[in-house]
Image (cartoon, rainbow, N blue to C red):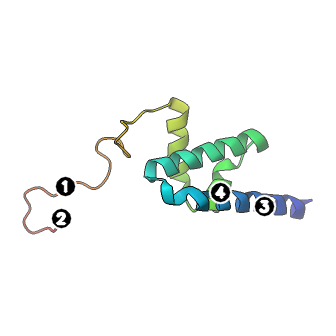
Amino acid sequence: MYVAYMADISEKIKAIREEFNEISYALDERRIRLWCAARARAYNRQHGRGGVMVVHKATGVSRPRIYAGLEELEHEQKLAADRVRRPGGGRKKNYGDPTRDT
């Protein structure tokens, strides 16, 4: 029973991995996060739980990043069309310190 269950999970991971590899070249950071979250949510609807872990194993996208995507989907947080991150996200600018490289 357990062996059959693990084989079933492996098949699902393989299917998600193939789908992700086909489209990942066209996705930016935000869209990867949202795609993975939507895939995890769909898995949870079908199987009850485990979607984040299955998508993580299939894609290599970190679990916290998938959870962040789930939060965005759940609360329908909208970013401006030209944004990938919220304001303040990303690397900070180096202003006025000549000893540090930018």
Distance in Å between CA atoms under marks 3 and 1 = 45 Å
Mark 3 / mark 1, whichever is N-terminal:
3
Label 3: how many residues lie within 10 Å, few (<14), some (14-19) or many (20+)? few
**Tag 1–tag 2 contact (CB < 8 Å):** yes
Q: What amino acid does circle 4 point to?
A: Glu
Secondary structure at numbered mark 2? loop
Q: Give the mark nearer the N terminus: 2 vs 4.
A: 4
Tell which circle, 3 or 4, labels the residue nearer the N-terminal end: 3
Residue at point 32%, 47% (across, down): 89
Q: Secondary structure at mark 4?
A: helix
The kind of residue on which mark 3 rests is Glu
Residue 48: image x %, image y %? 76, 41
Residue 83 on image: x %, y %: 35, 43
Q: Which residue is mark 4?
A: 19
Q: Dot 3 lies on which element? A: helix
Badge 4: how crowded within 10 Å, few (<14), some, or many (20+)?
few
Q: Residue at x 89, y 61 (%)?
A: 4
Q: CA distance from mark 2 to mark 3?
A: 45 Å
Res. 11 mark: 3
Q: Secondary structure at mark 1?
A: loop
Residue that badge 2 annotates:
102
Q: Amino acid at mark 2?
A: Thr
Considering depth in this image, is 19 or 98 the residue closer to the camera? 19
**What is the distance, in whole Å, between disc 1 and disc 4 at their CAs?**
37 Å
Contact between labelled residues 4 and 2, with CB atoms less than 8 Å apart: no
**Amino acid tagged 1:** Lys
Residue that label 1 marks: 93
The Cα atoms of the two marked residues, 1 and 2, are separated by 7 Å
Image location (x, y in percent) of residue 42: 69, 42
The reply to whether dot 2 and dot 3 touch (C-beta < 8 Å) is no
